[in-house]
Image (cartoon, grey):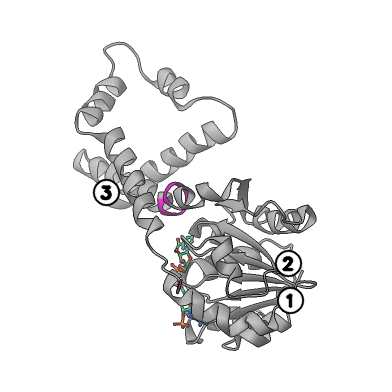
Amino acid sequence: MKIAILGCGNIGTSIAHGFADCDKINLKELTLTRRQLEPLDTFKQWGIKIHSDNKKAVKESECILLTVGPQQMVELLEDISDALDPKKHILVSVVTGVRIDQIRKYINPKVQVVRAMPNTAAAIMESMTTLSVESDFDQAGLNKVKQLFNYIGKTLVIPEELMVPATALGASGLAFFLRAIRAASQGGTEIGFHAEDSILIAAQTAKGAASLLLDSDHHPESEVDKVTTPRGITISGLNQMEHGGFSSAMIKGIVTSAEKAEQLFKDKE
Ligand SMILES: NC(=O)c1ccc[n+]([C@@H]2O[C@H](COP(=O)([O-])OP(=O)(O)OC[C@H]3O[C@@H](n4cnc5c(N)ncnc54)[C@H](OP(=O)(O)O)[C@@H]3O)[C@@H](O)[C@H]2O)c1
């Protein structure tokens, strides 16, 4: 499938990096757009087409990824609507808080639309991407989009009403876990490790913890039980963190992010 990524900023370039490295996509069939092109120079050197003409990018592609900010979305949809052909194109929006029915108001409503919520680990083919479609969506089209995101991580198809919560848990979630790793490394430095050793130990330990869950169907607490002994070191540290609000802070942060994500896009109703 020929792919265009329109509005290649943080998430667009992360996806482009993943596509470039996954060995499944012909780089000559990938087009990236944004208005200021300098940040995309590296992609040009790899043979990927880069320019600022969204309409042209749509015409030369089949799968169109929209990766602009919520407040740039209407302008982009109005720009490309004439070039969209329901028989040829699948539109994939990663834009937070914009529903499929809102997107359809600005384009030919027969064009198939998928909502996707990846994260920036797409750049290293480790994204968690949730996908959502309306009930009339063609299953073959969904499978094609799923396959694309499977090249750059894991995917899960969810009901559209969960897409905003998925932004908080999966996309913003990356920042939450990165901050947790930084906090662990700060603790590590206080108890004697140089900063770079501290980050290595904290990050590899976090990766191991995540892999324990992903590679088995174990519950996190069953893995915690294996590390905690009665009157032991781990449980005393863990309980101290809980007294400081560790789980509570994570839960409240995720709920707050989800509430904020809901309010980002206001269309011209
Ligand atoms: N960052 C994440 O981790 C993440 C994860 C999942 C979803 N998202 C969602 O993805 C969207 C983009 O987020 P982001 O962090 O990547 O934002 P961003 O870095 O600001 O990227 C948006 C890009 O769109 C370009 N742009 C704006 N209007 C355009 C137009 N008319 N035609 C072509 N390009 C245009 C801008 O570049 P120019 O000014 O040069 O045109 C900008 O680089 C948001 O809705 C966000 O919620 C983000």
The residue beneath circle 2 is 25
How would you rate the neighbour count of disc 3 (Cα within 10 Å): few for under 14, some for 14-19, many for 20 or more? few
Can you give x and y, in whole percent of width and height, for residue 236 in the image?
Answer: 24, 21
User: Where residue 240 sits in the image (x, y, percent)?
Assistant: 21, 27
Q: Earlier in the sequence, mark 3 or mark 1?
A: 1
Rounded to the nearest angstrom, the CA distance separating label 3 from label 2 is 41 Å
Residue type (three-letter) at the residue carrying disc 2: Ile
Please report the bounds of the magenta region as a residue range.
Answer: 168-172
Q: Quadrant of the N terminus?
A: bottom right
Does the CB distance between marks 3 and 1 fall below 8 Å? no
Name the quadrant containing residue 83.
bottom right
**Cα gap from disc 3 to disc 1, whole angstroms:** 45 Å
Residue 29 marker: 1
Q: Mark yes or no: residue 42 visible.
A: no
Dot 2, crowdedness within 10 Å: few (<14), some or many (≥20)? some
Q: Earlier in the sequence, mark 3 or mark 2?
A: 2
| Residue where numbered disc 3 is placed | 194
Residue at position x 73%, y 76% in the image:
29
- Residue located 38% across and 46% down the image: 177
Relative to residue 49, is residue 246 depicted above or below?
above
Q: Nearer the viewer, residue 138 or 269?
A: 269
CA distance separating discs 1 and 2 = 8 Å
Instruction: Please report the residue visible at 63 percent of the width from the left and 75 percent of the height from the top.
Output: 107
Give the structural element (helix, strand or loop) at label 1: helix
